[in-house]
Image (cartoon, rainbow, N blue to C red):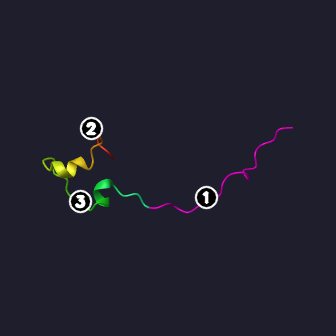
Amino acid sequence: MAGKATGDRRKPRVGKGAKVLPPARAIKIDVIDYKDVATLRKFISERGKIRS
């Protein structure tokens, strides 16, 4: 007879992972100027999409 799962088979929760920073904060940029092409290239993919 099929019964309800007791939940014992679930994986135990482990503590929180590493805190995820926005890409601009990861490389310590406070302000991104739209005219600064060198900085903007770090956030644009090869297809021209903005990385988040």
Q: Are the two marked residues, 1 and 3, in contact with CB atoms closer than 8 angstroms?
A: no
Residue 13 position within the rendered picture, expressed as x and y whole percent measured from the top left: 61, 58
**Identity of the residue drawn at 27% across and 48% down:** 43
Residue type of the residue flagged with mark 1: Arg
In this view of the protein, which residue sits in the foreground, 12 or 41? Answer: 41
Residue type of the residue flagged with mark 2: Gly
- The answer to whether 39 appears left or right of 46 in the picture is left
Classify mark 3: helix, strand or loop. Answer: loop
**Distance Cα–Cα, label 3 vs label 2:** 21 Å
Which residue matches tag 1? Answer: 13
Q: Which mark is residue 48?
A: 2
Which residue matches tag 3? Answer: 29
**Identity of the residue drawn at 23% across and 59% down:** 29
Classify mark 2: helix, strand or loop. Answer: loop
Residue type of the residue flagged with mark 3: Ile
27 over 41 or under it: above or below: below
Q: Are the two marked residues, 1 and 2, in contact with CB atoms closer than 8 angstroms?
A: no
Number of marks drawn: 3
> Most prominent secondary structure in the magenta stretch?
loop
Q: Earlier in the sequence, mark 1 or mark 2?
A: 1
